[in-house]
Image: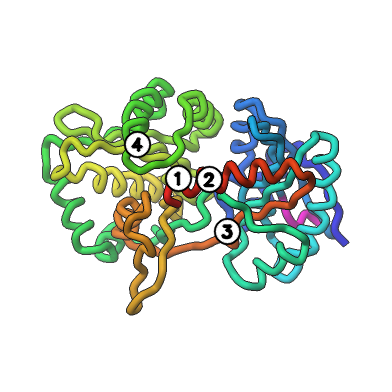
Amino acid sequence: MFQIKEIIQKQDWEDFLTSCEGKTFLNSWNWGEFQKMMGCKIWRFGIYSDELSATVLVIKIQAKRGVFLFVPHGPIMSVNSGVEIDVLRVLLSRLKEIAKEQNASFIRIASCFENSDENIKIFKDLGFRVSPTHMHPEITWELDISPTEDELLMNMRKTTRYLIRQAEKNKDVEIVKSQDINDIEKFNELYQATVNRHHFTPFSLKYLKNEFLAFNLDNQVCIFSGKYKGEIVASAVMIFWQGIGFYHQGASSLKYPKIPVSYLLQWEAIKEAKKRGCNLYNFWGTAPLVMIDNQLRVVNKKHPWSGLTLFKMGFGGYKKEYAGTYDFVLSSRYWLNYIIETVRKARRGL
């Protein structure tokens, strides 16, 4: 029998998550702090049996098209599989109460459960429907970085390894690390130029700054700037949390297409993750992938993330796919949101 209670101590939250697998920085205490900085109301719940078995962050999203409750990459669990539906049932009951209080028209859960028929059935059995969009990547690319640097290089695609070495030899290429909030503005300049090329919805400068500030308090974020002849042509915002390095935000220029600055930047970020004691590197989102002739390939080469996905795959690693994003409908107002998100997804070619 599970019970749900609010968790108010950061140490209790973070200590529990150290024992959990499949987690991302969206489960962290600081992601909740960032949401509060953005003006969102949040709840941090613990789901208990005899002891704490799962945690979940709940965010109230107040959009022009209505109010809804959102659970990013949760619930995150330490217990053995087989009780997911019980945990979700208890959570859903509490979320319905909150939704009524907050006048929310639906509940959205983007779980980090593995993509499987069994897990998909759990959501359907509880009355959820597939969301018309996703809030965070549902397919990510991950790399075990516990091997030595030489071993990691040898496991990369030959072209990727060659381009890293070419950039290392180029005296005009420099990778600079920073934890200065002012460098977020420099990142943002390049980031906005990248938006148009890859057709994704950009985050605001306020969003980028607040995210940086939330994680910088615990020395969990770093800006990497890749320069060619002193000009920033590639940049990334990395988050380091509980033994995992996350390539969360990236930006690049096509001004010098033959200078492989982005490759060296990623390699330096991977090495920084190793220095910080990380064993896993998460490249974040990719385009849909399919296995053909024993090789993973991008399903749709016209997908806006196709080229970026191939770039990430070149460093070695493996695909991780979540069970998806699901909505629990509470009001007829949901359907306006459904139509808007469906149209937006089609326009973006996703």
Q: Which residues are magenta?
A: 51-55
Question: Which disc number belongs to residue 343?
Answer: 2
Compare marks 3 and 2 and give the one earlier in the sequence: 3
Give me the C-alpha separation between circle 1 and circle 4. 13 Å
Looking at the image, residue 269 sits to the left or right of residue 11; the answer is left
Report if residue 107 lies within the magenta region: no
Report if residue 54 lies within the magenta region: yes
Residue ID at (86%, 43%): 97
The mark closer to the camera, 3 or 2, is 2
What percent of the width, then of the height, locates residue 19?
64, 57
Which of the 4 image quadrants contains residue 313? Answer: bottom left
- Judged by its main secondary structure, the magenta piece is strand
What percent of the width, then of the height, locates residue 35?
62, 32
Residue ID at (40%, 59%): 143
Q: Nearer the viewer, residue 106 or 214?
A: 106
Query: Mark 3: which amino acid?
Result: Gly
Question: Which disc number belongs to residue 347?
Answer: 1
Give me the C-alpha separation between circle 1 and circle 3. 32 Å
Q: Which residue is mark 3?
A: 22
Residue 78 in the image: above or below residue 202: below
